Amino acid sequence: MNKTEKEIAFEEKLDALILLKGLLIRNGEFHGQEEEEYYQALDRAFELLN
């Protein structure tokens, strides 16, 4: 199956967000504003598919 540019961009953004979340959790920084910004970025990633 050939992926569209939107699907590729979504997968790349999602991969980056997963790595970022892992780093923030490992450093004990995944709370408050960091957590809110992470979920906002995740929402924007899903918007790429529309």
Image: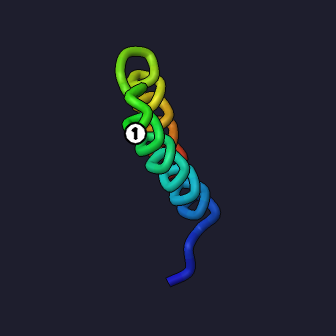
Between 12 and 25, the one nearer to me in the picture: 25
* Residue 47, horizontal then vertical, whole percent: 49, 41
* Residue 7, horizontal then vertical, whole percent: 54, 62
Residue that badge 1 annotates: 26
**Residue lying at the far front of the rendered structure:** 27
Q: Is residue 13 above or below residue 30?
A: below
Circle 1 — which element?
A: helix
Callout 1: 10 Å neighbours few (<14), some, many (20+)? few
Quarter of image, res 40: top left
- Please give the count of numbered marks on the rendered protein: 1
The residue at 45%/23% (across/down) is 34
Q: Is residue 9 above or below residue 45?
A: below
The residue at 44%/49% (across/down) is 18
Between 19 and 1, the one nearer to me in the picture: 19
Q: Is residue 16 above or below residue 26?
A: below
Residue type of the residue flagged with mark 1 = Arg
**Residue lying at the far top of the rendered structure:** 32
Between 17 and 27, the one nearer to me in the picture: 27
The residue at 47%/24% (across/down) is 37
**Residue lying at the far right of the rendered structure:** 5
* Residue 3, horizontal then vertical, whole percent: 56, 73
* Residue 45, horizontal then vertical, whole percent: 50, 44
Quarter of image, res 5: bottom right
Protein image colouring: rainbow
